[in-house]
Amino acid sequence: MTAPARLSSGDQAPGFSLPTDTGGQLSLADLRGRKVVLYAYPAAMTPGCTKQACDFRDSLASLQAAGYEVVGISPDKPEKLATFRERDEITFPLVSDTDKAVLTAYGAYGEKQMYGRTVTGVIRSTFVIDEAGRVERALYNVKATGHVAKLRRDLGLD
């Protein structure tokens, strides 16, 4: 497997409709007319992903005040996402992409470097999508710690 095709600013964001942590479905079309921060993470309840989710949770009020909806996406099953939400009081939707088709469409699944080895997996990424469904920012290989603070600065929220 080669590195996935990456999205760029101005690209149409790939549509999706995926199961959520609450047993429902969430589609990108449901969020049309709002700005969306879609972030891809490898696995619920791991230390880095927990830190990142809690950072988004703790910044949610200011992101929403600026008009952004936050959605997390991972290959975890909805049941695991529900446990993650409950354990860490996650207050935004988590969607399940078990077949990794959406992650792949966003360029957030494929070969990556991990501890000096090439592995295939989720590439920790964040996408800022505008009200019309276009990618404003596509950030790949972001760090779990400190990323939300940097994103807030980049969006002019600090």
Image (cartoon, rainbow, N blue to C red):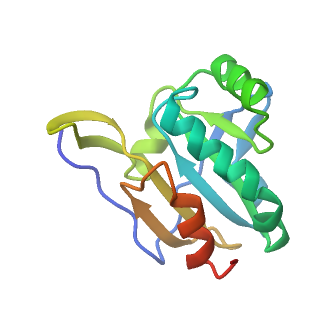
Residue 139 location, x and y as percent?
43, 64
The residue sitting at the bottom extreme is: 156
Q: Residue at x 42, y 47 (%)?
A: 124
Q: Residue at x 56, y 28 (%)?
A: 44
Camera-nearest residue between 44 and 158: 158
Residue 46 location, x and y as percent?
51, 28
Q: Is residue 70 left or right of residue 155?
A: right
Residue 50 location, x and y as percent?
59, 36
Camera-nearest residue between 61 and 112: 61
Q: How many labels sit on residues?
A: 0
Q: Compared to 5, does 53 lie above or below?
A: above
Q: Compared to 94, does 64 lie above or below?
A: below
Camera-nearest residue between 151 and 2: 151
Q: Residue at x 70, y 77 (%)?
A: 157
For the C terminus, which image quadrant? bottom right
Q: Is residue 9 left or right of residue 68?
A: left
Q: Compared to 21, does 126 lie above or below?
A: below
Q: Residue at x 46, y 27 (%)?
A: 99
Q: Is residue 129 left or right of residue 24?
A: left
For the N terminus, which image quadrant? top left
Camera-nearest residue between 69 and 5: 69
The quadrant in which residue 119 appears is top left
